Amino acid sequence: MEEERESALVIVVDVSPSAWWRPGAPASIASAAGSLDLGGALDHLHTFLNALLLVTQKTKVGVLWLADRRSVPVPLPSLGSRALHGGGTGARGQENGGVLEDLKRSLLELYESQCVPASGEGNGGRGCDRGQPALSSAYSKSLCVLKQHLETHEEGVEGIAVTDDVDLGLPKFRRRRTRVLFLHASADVPSQYIQIMNASFCAQKMGTVVDTFMLGGKDSSFLQQAASITGGMYSNFFAAAVSATEGSVPKKFSLSTYLINVLLPDSETRKSLQLPRGNASTTTLKVTCFLTHKPLDVGFVCSVCLSIFNERIKTCAVCGTTFQDRRALKKKVLSRQQ
């Protein structure tokens, strides 16, 4: 039996108020399986973490909250040395109430700083400071955490470093040992497309697998492409379940059961599994216009900042670059040739 190697997993959980809160309703997401509340999602996440730590003895875990306009790492002192950040150096313990209490405490602190008015007047104040979900920020932070882990626990084999160029056919001593799991619920933000694609290529370079489970049934073309680039899995179980049953709603669904059976195994183990419906077999490669936010089959790309537009424009709306028309460019080329 092959000896288990050091590995790491960062879970990015979308807790943005723009995805979970609706006026006059509790914190929940309307999905194909009914209403998934935020507290229930934390319970499922806690179950998944316990299963992961029980099955694998050399896996370190980190959790990041993805909120509006920012992302926050979650300290997990209960995990001790098995936490990627905020866990201290001691052994795993329950002196702080366990992992679930760590998650709830950190989430409460986040919402107090983001949603509770400074005057402390409850619902009569300004409410949550909503904005765009910081997906690119959370993605980049998760890769930074994993990069630090690789540098700390790098095991040189025959003089070859783990962080060298990586391809899909990795030797045994350079198999992918780092993963990012997104539990995502928000819609894509077109202005973050370049940052997310850059992070995906960085993850491919590191040999990091990016998996995604969509909460609420929405699709994310950005995370579909990230999974395709890194060899990970993109799952939208809720949307697939509705289409497979011709619009009917599955009566019973356990998020933790799905996570444990499908997303807990690593990329090598998944090759021996028969994956359920909801695993995307096709990837949406369409990009979105930076102005209209609509998907495009054919677009125009700025040569400076790589912004994408649905029609030819004279000046880039993102970086301000002025483009020459075809006639002026042709004259310039001909003058150089002469």
Image (spheres, rainbow, N blue to C red):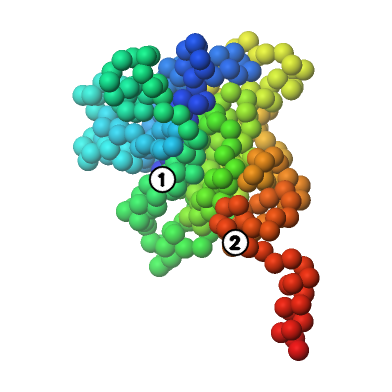
Name the element at disc 1: helix
Q: Quadrant of the C terminus?
A: bottom right
Q: Which disc number belongs to residue 117?
A: none
247 in relation to 161, above or below: above
* Mark 1 crowd level (few <14, some 14–19, many ≥20, 10 Å Cα): some
Looking at the image, can residue 270 be seen?
Answer: no
Taking the image as shown, residue 281 lies to the left or right of residue 26, namely right
- 222 or 213: nearer the viewer: 222
Where residue 197 appears, as percent x and y from the top left, is: 57, 50
The amino acid pointed to by label 2 is: Thr
Q: Can you identify the residue that label 1 sits on? A: 141
Name the residue located 56 percent from the left edge and 45 percent from the top edge.
191
Where residue 127 appears, as percent x and y from the top left, is: 40, 21
Where residue 42 appears, as percent x and y from the top left, is: 42, 22
Name the element at disc 2: loop
Name the residue located 62 percent from the left edge and 25 percent from the top edge.
217
Q: Can you identify the residue that label 2 sits on? A: 321
Q: Quadrant of residue 212?
A: top right
